[in-house]
Image (tube, coloured by chain):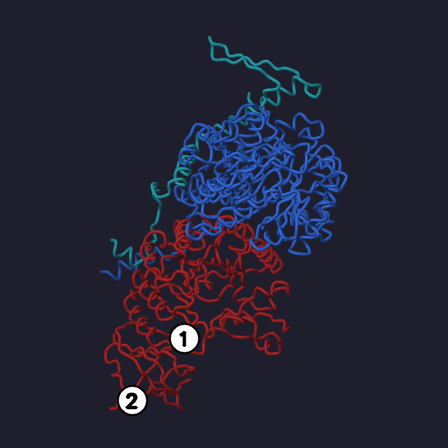
Amino acid sequence: MYWGEKNSTAIINEDSNSWIIDFNLESNEDTIDSIEFNFLKRLNDFQLRHQINEETKNLRQLIYAKMLFPQHISVQTNDKNDDPLELLEGK
Amino acid sequence: MKSQLNLSTQLAWPSQYDESIVARVTSVIDDIISLSGQKIYSKLSVDCIVTHNSNSNNNGSIYIKEKLDIYEGDILFLGLKQARVIFSVQSKTNSIFATVRCNSNCLMCSQPPLEHDDLDENLAIWDTAIDYMPENMDYIGITGGEPTILGIRLTQLLNKLTTKYPNILIDILSNGRRLSVQYLSELHRIHKPYNIKWCIPIYSDVDYIHDYIVQGNNAFWQTTRGLSQVYSAGFQSEIRIVLHTLSLARLEQLAKYITLNYPYVNHVALMGLENIGYTLYHNKLLTIDNYEDYIYKVSKAIIILRNFNINVSLYNIPLCHVPEELREYCRKSISEWKNSYHSDCHSCSKINECAGFFTWNLKLNPIVYPI
Amino acid sequence: MVRADLNIIRKEFRAFKGVEHYRGEFLHLLPFNFHRLKDERELLTSITGDYIIAEAGSVDKIINHRSTLDEPFIHDLIAGHFVSYNPPAEQIDILANRLRTKKGLYEIKPALHIIVLTLRCDHTCSYCQVSRVTENKTDYDLSKDQLNLIIEKILDSQESSITVEFQGGESLLAFDNIIYTVEALKERATVRNKKFKFVTCTNLSKITKDQIAFLKENTIAISSSLDGPEFIHNSIRHIKTRDSHQRLLSSLSIIDEVWSRDYVDVLMTTSRLSLKHPKEIIDEYIRLGFRSIFLRPISPYGFALRLESINYGSEDFFEFYQIGLEYILEKCKHGFDLREQYACIVLKKILTPFQDNYVDLMSPSGSMTRVVVYDYDGNIYASDEGRMLAQNRDFTFQIGNINQSWKEIYQNNSSRNILSHSFTELHAACSNCALEPYCGSDPIHHHATQFDIYGNMNDSTFCKRSKFIIEYLISLIEKGDENSEILRSWIH
């Protein structure tokens, strides 16, 4: 909606879970079809962005936290690299 | 061919299997080599087999299988049945051999690891040997196996070297996998980090491909974390890339990866493949057969790195095997003891600047183009 | 028996495994954003600032159909930190390091301290919002007392490597104060553990040999203005004698004679007239021996909006920029040594892991965190534009005065307000924009043009311009031709 501000306004219907979107023709360059098409395209793209965010938001937070406070955040990693003699000892 | 090595020494010869001597050659006159050294305990077995007779004066002669060039100042390792020159004054590229052990198992390893617990004996050998090393020394390498397996012993040797030689440069060839965890506290106990360069191989920008090449689970990320630590601790660092089909495939992408993720690295060394050890076993997999592609990718990688002001060298590659514009990056990198030239090389004007070949690579019958 | 056990372990350990053994089962996503290019291709950027251009539909595949991705693409994605077969935890350290290298340490530590010595000036440039042509020193100059307080503030500030920039009006008109300040700071530098660099901003209409000698001796760089050939330069820079351009040239030749051009940098102001003559402007820069030119639009606020001569739209600027940059690249192909600064700054962000020092394009915003301005009357501002807004009675970016401590200044409401609007990472529109790693936060721009310090990016000339430049530069780089090589050589 934000990026399509010039061409559309939205009315949120309180009773149901729907948004009614009015498309406005602002200039001669656009047609209602093309505005609608671009809107749906953006909708799709933002849905993808939402999916990326869902899957990675915890990681993003963690990376920023580690960046800002390296001493306070400790991440567990796989540091096993014993050679055979050490593996033997470990047994 | 048997050669007689006459030794003169006050030392009591090893009488038991686990006794050995580390000694400095004090003079070489005619055929008599005088030694000064001390006994240590070691079970190390090495290349040249000897027998010796000792007479009542404790002067002895030992027969060695192949002729060794021995000079005053060299340091020898002598066991009950073994003799080896472990430090050669004539050479500019001596190495401390840390251990036969390794926690990786690279497909192209030229020094296949052994499961032999040689940590204490190697410490003893080298701790003694450092005392016998000459008054001045600019450079020494530390190889293996994987040196960081020595743990605290490695720190001891490094500190002993930098104390004796305040301006030395030490290259440590390591896979870097222990540097961020198991060896981390030791890392901070090493004095004069600026004198020490960790030479760490990275073979791909894709983590699991690197892991495959070095045959180590999670090796890539362990190594990356290690490199990061080495940088923050004030050491110099070098990335080494042995060139074979697997590392060549994404060499340009790796160069770009280095500029973005390891921009602080002091040097990148692109290295020709040594035809020995595991490489022989994986010959078909590793040998590069498309020369144009190889040169193209190497050139591209060098340009990418040089654009970011990262120093690059080509190691172990003869001058005539690269186009003229790349020759400025070639270095005479092969240790003397395994360095040989093709018979045709002797008519080449640049033989003195050229790396030549690994002795065992000559078996592959390379073609040379004397310049 | 130990030996037998060892053999078993060794055999397993030393057995060679195929590549499948080392590749994980599941492809994890790492944080990334994407931007749809005009041809429908997708530009992906990871949290580290790495980028990949992929064919349309790739993002959908990455999220929803990972098994359909082909191997070379997966390899590029792994290397660019977009996806990983290994648990992402392995990379956290490295990703945090990359992010820190790009963004810096989030702290208020201005490295650029601008001192407005005087508002007096001999020019009456059309776009200038601050200068006064007057002899009145008392009203429009910093007094010695005020300078002393400023010197204390500089020595008290957190950053140890500081560039002090003398501004105005015309800074050379207060040359005594330049001398005073430079000497005072140099004297106390070692004790206070500071390293100083100095720059003085001047129109170079009049500079004496003595003045140049002082500048040379103390390595004070000169930042001046060159808007183009005479007819353009003089149309913007108004002086009674109408010979601004000629005066500039005379001063430059004295500097060449007595010192060196290496210490002179010039910036340009772009007017409507400039937009029509990009090539002539560039030719003038080359003719006068300059190796760097900064093609940037005028800040479209306050004063500028009211003047026909400097009020123009984004599209006009884009056309000017494109013609200009391509002309510069042509010149480079013919051996000329000239770089375009805007491109250098943005390319550094795109192609290297580092950040640039350009305060107007960073997040957190460089205003206040990296720059501080001491005005002629002792007031302190978050940036140069901020003090210009004050001329129109807008004090949003005034953060204090020289009688206050830094603590008081940075913890007051003004500072908090500015700081809280300085992060693209937190902005609704910017935080999921793929171009964010290459862009920045400019709260002053949005406050001045939209009367909204938060900024509405849909409508923002800043956003539009940034997107244009970034997309344009990436398209030039991706061509892989001689232009790309020249551009790549500019990042160092």
> Does any portion of residue C474 appear in the rendered image?
yes
When the figure is inspected, residue C207 is found, relative to residue B70, above or below; the finding is above
Say which element carries label 1.
loop
Q: Is residue A66 left or right of residue B203?
A: left
Mark number displayed over residue C491? none
Q: Quadrant of residue B153?
A: bottom left
Q: Are marks 1 and 2 in contact (CB under 8 Å)?
A: no
Residue C202 percent location from the top left of the image: 63, 43
The quarter of the image holding the N terminus of chain C is: bottom left
CA separation in Å, label 1 and label 2: 30 Å
Q: Which one is nearer the viewer's eye here, C37 or B168?
A: B168
- Chain A colour as displayed: cyan
Q: Give the chain of mark 1.
A: B
Q: Which one is nearer the viewer's eye here, C65 or C34?
A: C34
Check disc 1 and give the amino acid type. Answer: Asn
Please name the residue shown 46% across and 32% down the image. Answer: C400
Say which element carries label 2.
loop
Check disc 2 and give the amino acid type. Answer: Asn
Mark number displayed over residue B136? 1
**Which residue is label 2 attached to?**
B59
Residue, far right = C231
- Chain B colour as displayed: red
Q: Give the chain of mark 2.
A: B
What crowding class fits label 1: few (fewer than 14 Cα within 10 Å), some (14-19), or many (20 or more)? few
Residue C285 percent location from the top left of the image: 71, 46
- Chain C colour as displayed: blue
Q: Is residue B189 left or right of residue C95?
A: left
Residue C130 percent location from the top left of the image: 61, 32
Mark positioned earlier in the residue sequence (1 or 2): 2
